[in-house]
Amino acid sequence: MNNNGILGRLDHFAILAFSIPLFIYLLTLAPTVTFFDSGEFLTAIASLGVAHSPGYPLFINYAKPFTFLPIGSIALRVNFATAVSAALACYGVYLLTVKFLEGEETSWQGRFRGLPVKLSALAAAVTFACTARLWLQSNHDKPYPLLAFICAVVFYLMLLWRESFLSGDERPAYVYLGAFLCGLGAGAHQIMVLMIPTYAFLLWSADHRVILRFKEFFIAFAFGVLGFGIHLHLVVRAFQHPVLNWGDSKNLEQFLWNILRKGYPTEKPNRDLNLLWSQLNAFNVPYEFTVVGMALLIIGLGYLCFKKRELVLGYLIALGSFLAVIVGYFNTPGELIFLTEEFFTPLYCLSAVFIGVGLFTLLKEAAQRLPDSAPLRLALLVLLFMLPVNIFARNFVENDQHENYIAFDYASNTLRSLPQNAVMYTWGDSGAFPLWYLQGVERMREDLDLPHTPHLVFDWYLDSMPRMFKGSQLYKLPMDYRSPDNTLLTSVSEQYNRRPVFVDFSTKYSIDFKNFVLHQRGITFRLDNPAVPQSPPDLDSWPIYSLRGVLGDHDMFFRDLDTGKAILIYAAALIESGQTRLRMGQKEAAVRDLQIAAAISPENKPQIDAILKASGVQ
């Protein structure tokens, strides 16, 4: 590739655009499994399996080689892989910013040997690195940073094609490679297709007649299909029976079910203006880049509007495409809007590029109006980094996960609660996925079965647990009767006389177990016949629990919704245990449980004081 190619941009500042973000991410990297989809992704990557629809085959195959590194746990290695992909996305910002500003050399830049462009690009890359969204995705397993990098590279390739075409030395290989990467990028996430209108516009705007070049478009389409072939991973691995084989894509029907995401609810809410506004705010430039960043974005768009209008229009087309599909078509319910926030990562990547252009524009205007003083101009260069430093300081504490063991400990404490050969039903993803990781990857408590209740409605999920579901009546239930409640209660009736049956905290409060009583064992509950006498909460569970980051110091690190929920579950379980002990006359043990609950969740202290006062306990 020539000096304008990707390798040609690997100067010292380009290396910094990758290494500074990587250093930040390693500083705040989660040491193990976290909540939400983490445990599921880790299990799929370690077993080279299939994650939830649409399967994420590119992300899984990208991260798999990192699992062979001789450092830490499998989870740490995969988290490191994500940090590398996020740093690459930041390099993509640098690459595009330099390309956008190509030809902007002036006499005042000459004194600094092109430093203003490169430093503006570096500042844009570090700014993007420190945004809340990318930083959150960088320090544990997420596919979106990898997708953002691919989107940036394809955009760059389209610019190289335009450049070669307009100079009379057309190189269609750039388009073919870009098409291949688009197909491949869909294996990281399907929102890759939302960038295609922008890439098509960059081609069309160079010469409207390109739409008549059917041969080249057919070849590009073939390369796109070749890249999309990464999805054959779902089929190939299904026949190998990996630990996690979501959807079991052994036939065309299941393959399409998987990649078309047919397993998700399709009922749309009635949209009003409040919901629409909330959906639009899923893409929030002022929140990610601050108001200053938003102003710089507008300046950057304005600066290039007359010089390189196709870049501005390309960004606006991408913005319209993302909003039309993610906000317009998806019409996400209010409680799930937070899921769509991650989809905008490629758009934030492009936004950071224009912010870099805005930084350069201000620097240029200031330098041309100020006295020709080297110290003054060096000071201007330093001012470029005020924005990334500010965003770094604002988001550091909130994204620092280097001591985040909450999900790991919550899952391991759950496993410690269960007797040999037990079965425990889970409900929420965050209650289930860390257990999948510990059992499927770290090989803890393989004597247990841990069925996930929402998945009991699928035959492919039942097939994945033959020890438990071989010959089960669940296969015979009509689809109309396969609600989570019905499948759970049917399964419990099959298992109850064979082995100890437990449910987690969320399941207890999601299902009406009217034919059973629930006896507490730490943060789990055993199902028993009502004729079984009530026993006190198990005294052996809490002393063997690990409560790192829970007892009083949980504000020292990252705390998302599910982490906060886990902490509250500890407190709620202890309150329940304390109340049961009070009813049974075990006042000393009850006070101990309630005191720990108050230490874990100070917001519950008034409730705890009221419980103690009502029982006459000081």
Image (tube, helix red, strand yellow):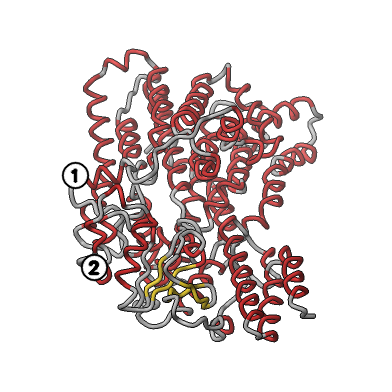
Residue 547, located in which quarter of the rendered image? bottom right
Distance between mark 1 and mark 2 Cα atoms: 23 Å
Q: Secondary structure at mark 1?
A: helix
Label annotation for residue 252:
1
Residue 495, located in which quarter of the rendered image? bottom left
Residue 226, located in which quarter of the rendered image? top left
Residue furthest to the front in view is 531
| Residue 367, image x, y percentages | 74, 30
Label annotation for residue 466:
2
Give the mark, 1 or 2, whose residue is nearer the N terminus: 1
Which label sits in the foreground, 1 or 2? 2
- Which sits in the foreground, 455 or 107? 455
| Picture residue at 78% right of the left edge, 74% below the top | 613
Residue flagged by tag 1: what amino acid is it? Answer: Leu
Q: State the quadrant of the C terminus.
A: bottom right
- Which sits in the foreground, 420 or 261? 420
| Residue 328, image x, y percentages | 48, 28
Q: State the quadrant of the N terminus.
A: top left
Work out whether 452 lies above or below 293.
below
| Picture residue at 64% right of the left edge, 72% below the top | 575
| Residue 101, image x, y percentages | 56, 29
Q: Secondary structure at mark 2?
A: helix
**How dense is the environment of label 1, judged by Cα within 10 Å: few (below 14), some, or many (20 and up)?**
few
Work out whether 522 lies above or below 232.
below
| Picture residue at 39% right of the left edge, 42% below the top | 265
